[in-house]
């Protein structure tokens, strides 16, 4: 079946229910601005060293592992909207707690809990897109979802970086208010447009199915390696720039550049993502990211960092929408959120590895050695994508055929 044969009415050929999810994603992305500034906050306001910051931020990633493992199955079992509500309510309360003066150990515990609750809605929202959009339009839908996320990140961190010059506590309180506002305004819209969850196997049977899916785990491992490098942009880059004498707003401006470029280029990139093979899109993006980290090896001025950010920003344009599409294609209908959640492990595990290994490497070997290691890891990622291509593409073809019927 050609792409032109499956085109429901609506903007960009996508149904109204998708755009409801898109709106929720946009508002959540604007509001989630604590995580990108976490390392800068721990360094400036808490006075922690690079190694300790890495371990504390790793606690946030550890909570995300719990969210990925539980959030997907809970969404399949009880419905995505309920999971979104529970995650946002808990996150708002934890943000208020994080704004209080607490010990480093308590702080790590709170960040672990916040990582679990703030990332809980992710698998639900990702799988709902796969259910609502025909297979032929999934690349387009996931690209538009990434566009919403990137537009939000272009706005949120810039404003939060400015607000942090007065008080980081205000940043935590503001995010809590925005999360609650999402529930009041957007949840009624979601309830009226999103279908209920389909019948789901028991927890034991669900994870038995997942455990034996080699294609899923191989692809997740590849993405984890990529994200371990990609997330150095929020784990260690702000520490390096702070040590070099740059301010928090100077770093926040780089995040704004990243988000602004993604907002400008994500929609034009849709045609490329839809027409080229997935492995080619992802491999090219990872290679361009490697060039960006190579620039960071020699960076000494602000515009050097800006150039590096531009390079790995362009590199990521096709990677994340294609990755979400791959998982939607290979997932069984009854376990779509579970598969998205398991694949979503690459984010929290990547955060743990990025913060832990990145912080330790920076403290022991210095920034240049850290960036060279990132370049090497990205080269390995490209090779792994190529080696695993055949088995992955076979599953994608079978999954799309089953979804079409």
Image (spheres, rainbow, N blue to C red):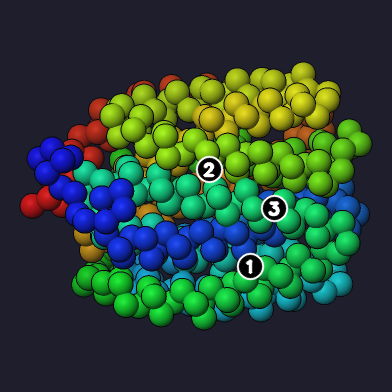
Residue 343 badge? none
Above or below — where is 143 with respect to 371?
below
| In-image side of 249 versus 213 (left or right) | right
Q: Depth check: 371 or 288 in front?
A: 288
Above or below — where is 389 with respect to 165?
above
Which residue position is annotated with label 1?
114
Which residue position is annotated with label 2?
263
SS for callout 3: helix
Q: Depth check: 304 or 151 in front?
A: 151
Q: Quadrant of residue 235?
A: top right
Which residue position is annotated with label 3?
157
Q: Residue at x 69, y 64 (%)?
A: 111
| In-image side of 252 versus 221 (left or right) | right
> Where is residue 33 drawn, in percent x and y?
67, 58
Closer to us: mark 3 or mark 2? 2
Tell me the quarter of the image containing the N terminus. top left
Alpha carbon of mark 1 to alpha carbon of mark 3: how far?
A: 18 Å
Q: Earlier in the sequence, mark 3 or mark 2?
A: 3
Q: Residue at x 39, y 63 (%)?
A: 21
Closer to us: mark 1 or mark 2? 2
């Amino acid at each position: 079946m050609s792409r032109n044969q499956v085109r429901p009415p609506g903007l960009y050929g996508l149904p109204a229910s998708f755009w409801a999810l898109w709106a929720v994603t946009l508002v959540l992305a604007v509001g989630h601005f604590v995580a990108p500034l976490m390392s800068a906050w721990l360094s400036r306001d808490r006075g922690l060293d690079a190694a300790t910051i890495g371990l504390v931020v790793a606690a946030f990633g550890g909570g995300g592992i719990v969210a990925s493992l539980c959030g997907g199955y809970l969404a399949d079992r009880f419905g995505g909207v309920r999971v979104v509500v529970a995650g946002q309510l808990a996150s708002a309360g934890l943000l208020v707690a994080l704004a209080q003066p607490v010990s480093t150990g308590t702080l790590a515990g709170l960040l672990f809990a916040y990582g679990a609750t703030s990332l809980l809605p992710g698998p639900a929202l990702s799988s709902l897109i796969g259910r609502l959009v025909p297979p032929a339009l999934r690349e387009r839908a996931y690209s538009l979802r990434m566009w919403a996320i990137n537009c939000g990140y272009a706005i949120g961190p810039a404003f939060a970086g400015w607000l942090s010059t007065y008080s980081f506590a205000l940043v935590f309180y503001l995010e809590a208010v925005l999360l609650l506002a999402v529930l009041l305004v957007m949840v009624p819209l979601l309830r009226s447009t999103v279908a209920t969850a389909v019948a789901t196997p028991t927890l034991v049977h669900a994870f038995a199915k997942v455990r034996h899916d080699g294609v899923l785990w191989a692809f997740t491992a590849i993405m984890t390696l990529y994200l371990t490098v990609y997330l150095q942009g929020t784990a260690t880059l702000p520490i390096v720039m702070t040590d070099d004498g740059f301010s928090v707003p100077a770093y926040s401006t780089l995040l704004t550049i990243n988000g602004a470029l993604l907002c400008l280029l994500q929609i034009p990139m849709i045609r490329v993502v839809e027409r080229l093979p997935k492995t080619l899109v992802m491999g090219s993006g990872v290679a361009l990211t490697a060039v960006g980290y190579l620039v960071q090896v020699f960076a000494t001025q602000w515009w050097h960092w800006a150039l590096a950010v531009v390079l790995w920003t362009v590199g990521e344009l096709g990677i994340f929408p294609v990755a979400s599409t791959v998982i939607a294609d290979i997932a069984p209908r009854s376990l779509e959120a579970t598969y998205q959640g398991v694949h979503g492990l690459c984010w929290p595990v990547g955060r743990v590895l990025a913060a832990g290994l990145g912080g330790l490497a920076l403290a022991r070997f210095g920034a240049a050695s850290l960036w060279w290691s990132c370049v090497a890891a990205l080269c390995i990622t490209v090779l792994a994508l190529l080696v695993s291509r055949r088995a992955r593409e076979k599953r994608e073809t079978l999954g799309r055929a089953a979804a079409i019927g």
